[in-house]
Image (spheres, grey):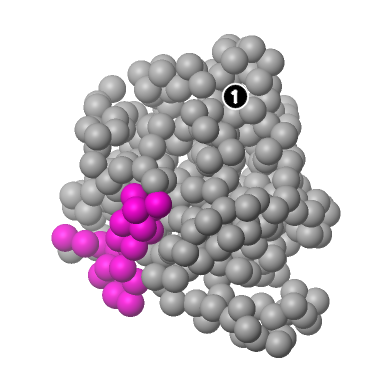
Amino acid sequence: MSKVYFTKELDKVDKLFDKADLGKIIQKDDFVVLKIHFGERGNTAYLKPDRVKPLVKKVKKQGGNPFWADANTLYEGGRQNTLDHLQTAFDHGYTFGKTGAHVLIADGLHGKTSEKIQVNYKHFKILKVAPLIFEADVLLSVAHFKGHMLTGFGGAIKNVGMGLGTRVGKLDMHTDCDNCPERTTCLKKKKIEACWVGSPDLVQEKMAEYAAGILERFKNKCAFINFITDVTENCDCMEYNSEPMVPDIGILASLDPVAIDQASVDLVNQTEGRIQAQDKFRTIWPEVNWETQLKYGEEIGLGSRKYELVAL
């Protein structure tokens, strides 16, 4: 059973970091990637710098060298190439002056730079991952927990798995068209939308495989923080956001990505809010069984759904 640490106080992420003893995974001079989603242009639900910048101080106090990072998006928008992505991050407050850490985009100017990882999962034998990530010694996932049209919710698993795939890797996760003759030209022809035909279950399983493969490279040098705030129906990739489903709940921290996502779902479903249902994510996205990513993640060794919630 994995421990998941919890605080209701949104300005206490530094105290949560200490309570969860996340500093133990950081050694002096380690490069620490703070994997975060900077939010699409027009979206306002993304994690604000003031909420997460205490993590930079915590990493530096441990002797680490922190930097914010993400990979470019598959779809067109404000994060499809590195220059636009950096501008979006800066516009949303992710500057060295405001956070104390630099922003790096991990997969090259056009999202074509890739490191291939050999794995042996049901769907993938090779993963195409943003290579800069593996130059870091420690991975700290900093995720905004919210709903998602294809995966039911997005948390730690999605932040790492989908977030750190290259554009081709993201296409592989979103689709079920391995034998399609047009597949190799989709990115060049900008026919991405036509290729997003993967079922929710398939996308979630592929995403979990990416997360497992990436985290295997970090062994015991990875940790996860979920902010359960502004829990909108859809992800921060949208150029807009809906009214939150529930009031802000708090922050979670764990060494287990499956456990922290399971705990996040449970807390949202246990909280009264705009969506009145025992399973709020299934109510919003009835075609999506969000449990797939957790069940399959547990099956392939990504983590455990059983957890102990430890309050700050």
- Name the foreground residue: 298 vs 246: 298
Query: Is residue 215 shown to the viewer in this render?
Result: yes
Q: Position of residue 288 (x, y in %)?
A: 34, 71
Q: Position of residue 225 (x, y in %)?
A: 44, 36
- Name the foreground residue: 25 vs 224: 25
Q: Position of residue 83 (x, y in %)?
A: 81, 52
Query: Is residue 99 shown to the viewer in this render?
Result: no
- Name the foreground residue: 234 vs 159: 159
> Counting other residues with Cα less than 10 Å from the Cα at mark 1, is it few (<14), some (14-19), or many (20 or more)?
many
The residue lying at 53 percent from left, 40 percent from top is 216
The residue lying at 45 percent from left, 22 percent from top is 22
Q: Main secondary structure of the magenta part?
A: helix
- What residue is pinned by disc 1? 56
Please state which amino acid type lies under the numbered disc 1.
Val
Q: Which residues are magenta?
A: 278-300
Quarter of the image holding residue 74? Answer: bottom right
Number of labelled discs? Answer: 1
**Image quarter in which the N terminus is found:** top left
**Position of 44 compared to 295: left or right?**
right
**Image quarter in which the C terminus is found:** top left
Quarter of the image holding residue 127? Answer: bottom right
